[in-house]
Image (spheres, helix red, strand yellow):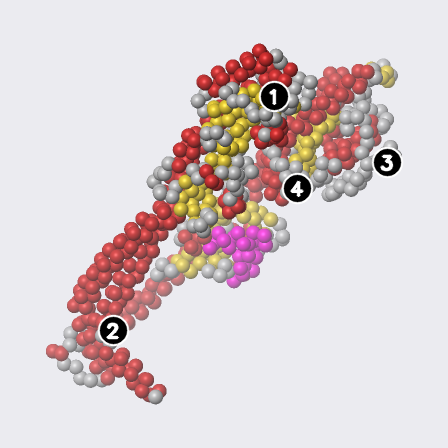
């Protein structure tokens, strides 16, 4: 049975022909062309249609957003103006004539603004002011949804409460705002109702796609405007969950019928609502499928036809000569006598040609090798004379040549480097990046000029080098390794570091300057938001700097600024960001803390200030006003808001301190020492504003502070 199988295989192989193989190859190429172009065209058309659909629904969404924004911005402005009207707020205590004036005003506003259906106000005593409507007996406005919604959101405006008017069955949106009484508290609500029929008509209009649909959701996720009024006040769970996972407006989700939809959403700034526009994906892809099938069919027919023509042409031009050549080669191998008339390429001529060509090729190759070796020696002699370090490495990264400059710069002998990996001179933390740079040159075939990295010398010291990497090729153009030329840029790096440090450092105190603080603090704020950790931002002011400068001289003023900086360094941790923002202003950003930790820092600061002020022979008393703000990761804000809040608190404490000083007759005191009167700013630093001291709680520490100075604990 085994022999039979072998015979069948041999028999099958004997039947194969060059013409048949050419046809099979042509057919396979045609099939590959069809599959490739079919896939390519399908992909292009798919993404083109998806992109087009997203553009269409985004355009529709933007137009609807602008329309709703414009309509409700006007209504919000109207209701805010009404809330500021004293007569409307105090309507419960007014006469009938005054209440009628209010109603006349409501009627005038509704007449001017066609978007407004009703304007009315209700009060806690049951009073209801509304035109053309008589409340039924026992009607209490305080129990109505629009009244409760306004009270729940006071003092802000309640927007987007949909309801169906009982008489006309018309759907309306109620916008309401609580009315604050002159005596305090809230005693009523003013509301504006507008029809959503116009918006619903706009939403119901179909665009380019039959299934295109838009609707509006409020802040809680309830639908408040929809062409299908049965969906109003409902919160589709799948849609709400999808919105939480996307931030750029585009998203996909499955609707209640488990149909995949392409959608886009945007926020209405004035109301906080979400406008959603969607279209079923199958509606978008239906024309794509038809186009793809047509193009694949057309491409397949053309490819098969061209493949057929190609197989005929190649068979006529190649198959017969190749068959004759194969026959002659077999006869030569078999040792048969050949007749010149029976074949195209006589055996003796083919054999002689092959031998002669092989011999000539070998001689030429040897000559080229010798020539290349001579050129290589000359080339490397020139490389040895180069001032810049030059190396050659193989594809494994091992040195095969280094010039004298390279050895001299790194302190190695040539034999210590040849055959070793270039990782020998590259620090461990930079080896991965270096291998990536070499691999990029290998993959792209383009040189990498100006790549800079650190180089490890034999004595362990580090220098910076700027390296150009290029490929090495043999005579056949094959890549056999890399060549590099480097230049020592250590001094340039040092100068750049000095320039960079001076750009972000305050020269007097050594702290960060405003530029450095804003940059580092901004980065830290982003990390805090991502890692969900709290921050404390302190804003400080050195009290009495102008007085020190005027009375004791600017040198003493500079000493006071430096001393304040030293106190801050001793108070806070090394991981905290300390800065002198300019003049007598300082700022500190303390990371990974809670708001309660602020009292610990203020206690530290006060202890260090008291210790310094108790020293003998001081020409001035150190006094610092301090304010802080807390960054809550659950309610993130921007850096400018934190700084403004801390600055405000610092200013209030500074003013409180001045007030205390004026009542206690504390001020600059003249102390006579010898024949010189010295001015000592005598304000005591009340860091907590009320003079209290905070307990020494546990606080994350990575700095030098170990508690209050000796003699100050427990005070």
Where does residue 12 sit, x and y in percent of width and height? 27, 80
Instruction: Looking at the image, tell me whether mark 1 or mark 4 is earlier in sequence order.
Output: 1
Whole-number angstrom distance, CA of label 3 to CA of label 4: 31 Å
Segment colored magenta: 416-439
Q: Which residue is mark 1?
A: 127
User: Label for residue 713?
Assistant: 3
Instruction: Looking at the image, tell me whether mark 3 or mark 4 is earlier in sequence order.
Output: 4
Compared with residue 505, is residue 699 higher up or lower down, i.e. above or below? below
Task: Residue at 48% x, 52% y: name it.
Answer: 437
User: Label for residue 533?
Assistant: 4
User: Label for residue 354?
Assistant: 2
The residue tagged with tag 4: helix, strand or loop?
loop
Camera-near label (2 vs 4) is: 4
**Is the residue marked by circle 4 packed among few (<14), some (14-19), or many (20+) residues within 10 Å?**
some
Whole-number angstrom distance, CA of label 1 to CA of label 3: 65 Å
Where does residue 574 sit, x and y in percent of width and height? 71, 40
Whole-number angstrom distance, CA of label 1 to CA of label 2: 116 Å
Instruction: Looking at the image, tell me whether mark 1 or mark 3 is earlier in sequence order.
Output: 1
Whole-number angstrom distance, CA of label 1 to CA of label 4: 50 Å
Instruction: Looking at the image, tell me whether mark 2 or mark 4 is earlier in sequence order.
Output: 2
Camera-near label (1 vs 4) is: 1
């Amino acid at each position: 049975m085994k022999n039979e199988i072998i015979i069948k295989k041999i028999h099958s192989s004997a039947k194969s022909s060059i013409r048949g193989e050419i046809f099979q190859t042509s057919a396979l190429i045609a099939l590959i062309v069809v599959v490739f172009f079919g896939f390519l065209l399908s992909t292009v058309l798919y993404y083109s249609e998806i992109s087009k659909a997203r553009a269409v629904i985004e355009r529709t969404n933007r137009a609807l957003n602008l329309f709703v924004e414009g309509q409700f911005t006007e209504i919000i402005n109207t209701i805010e103006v009404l809330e500021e009207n004293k007569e409307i707020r105090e309507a419960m205590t007014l006469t009938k004539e005054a209440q009628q004036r209010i109603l006349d005003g409501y009627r005038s506003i509704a007449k001017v603004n066609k978007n407004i259906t009703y304007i009315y106000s209700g009060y806690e005593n049951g009073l209801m002011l509304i035109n053309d409507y008589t409340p039924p007996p026992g009607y209490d406005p305080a129990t109505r949804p629009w009244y409760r919604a306004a009270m729940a959101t006071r003092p802000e405006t309640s927007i987007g409460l949909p309801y169906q008017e009982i008489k006309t069955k018309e759907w309306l949106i109620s916008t309401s705002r609580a009315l604050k009484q002159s005596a305090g508290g809230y005693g009523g609500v003013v509301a504006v109702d507008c029809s959503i029929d116009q918006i619903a008509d706009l939403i119901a209009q179909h665009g380019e796609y039959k299934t295109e649909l838009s609707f509006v959701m409020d802040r809680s996720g309830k639908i408040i405007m929809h062409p299908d009024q049965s969906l109003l006040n409902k919160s589709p769970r799948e849609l709400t969950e999808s919105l939480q996972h996307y931030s750029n407006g585009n998203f996909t989700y499955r609707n209640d019928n488990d149909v995949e939809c392409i959608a886009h959403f945007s926020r209405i700034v004035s109301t906080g609502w979400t406008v959603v526009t969607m279209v079923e994906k199958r509606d978008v892809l239906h024309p794509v499928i038809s186009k793809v099938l047509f193009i694949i069919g057309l491409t397949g027919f053309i490819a098969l036809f061209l493949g057929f023509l190609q197989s005929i042409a190649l068979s006529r031009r190649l198959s017969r000569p190749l068959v004759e050549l194969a026959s002659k080669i077999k006869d030569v191998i078999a040792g048969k006598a050949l007749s010149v008339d029976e074949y195209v390429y006589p055996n003796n001529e083919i054999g002689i040609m092959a031998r002669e060509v092989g011999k000539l090729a070998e001689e030429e190759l040897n000559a080229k090798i010798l020539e290349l070796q001579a050129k290589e020696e000359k080339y490397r002699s020139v490389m040895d004379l180069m001032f810049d370090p030059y190396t050659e490495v193989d594809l494994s990264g091992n040195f095969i040549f280094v010039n004298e400059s390279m050895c001299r710069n790194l302190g190695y002998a040539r034999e210590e480097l040849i055959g070793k990996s270039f990782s020998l001179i590259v620090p461990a933390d930079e080896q991965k990046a270096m291998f990536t740079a070499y691999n990029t040159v290998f993959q792209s075939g383009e040189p990498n000029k100006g790549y800079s990295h650190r180089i490890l010398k034999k004595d362990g010291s580090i220098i910076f080098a700027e390296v150009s990497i290029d490929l090495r090729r043999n005579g056949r153009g094959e890549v056999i390794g890399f060549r590099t030329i480097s230049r020592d840029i250590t001094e340039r790096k040092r100068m750049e570091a000095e320039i960079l440090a001076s750009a972000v450092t305050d020269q007097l105190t050594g702290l960060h300057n405003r530029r450095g603080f804003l940059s580092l603090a901004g980065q830290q704020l982003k990390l805090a938001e991502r890692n969900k950790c709290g921050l404390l931002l302190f804003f400080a002011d050195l009290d009495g700097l102008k007085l020190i400068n005027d009375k004791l001289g600017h040198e003493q003023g500079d000493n006071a600024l430096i001393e304040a900086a030293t106190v801050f360094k001793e108070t806070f941790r090394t991981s905290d960001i300390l800065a002198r923002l300019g003049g007598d202003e300082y700022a500190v950003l303390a990371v990974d803390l809670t708001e309660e930790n602020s009292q610990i820092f203020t206690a530290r600061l006060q202890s260090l200030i008291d210790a310094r002020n108790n020293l003998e022979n001081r020409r001035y008393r150190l006094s610092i006003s301090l304010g802080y703000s807390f960054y809550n990761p659950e309610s993130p804000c921007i850096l400018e808001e934190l700084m403004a809040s801390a600055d405000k608190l610092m200013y209030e404490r500074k003013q409180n301190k001045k007030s205390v000083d004026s009542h206690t007759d504390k001020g600059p005191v003249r102390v006579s020492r010898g024949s010189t009167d010295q001015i000592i700013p005598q304000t005591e630093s009340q860091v907590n504003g009320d003079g209290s001291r905070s307990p020494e709680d546990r606080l994350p520490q990575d700095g030098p502070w170990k508690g209050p100075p000796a003699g100050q604990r427990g005070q």
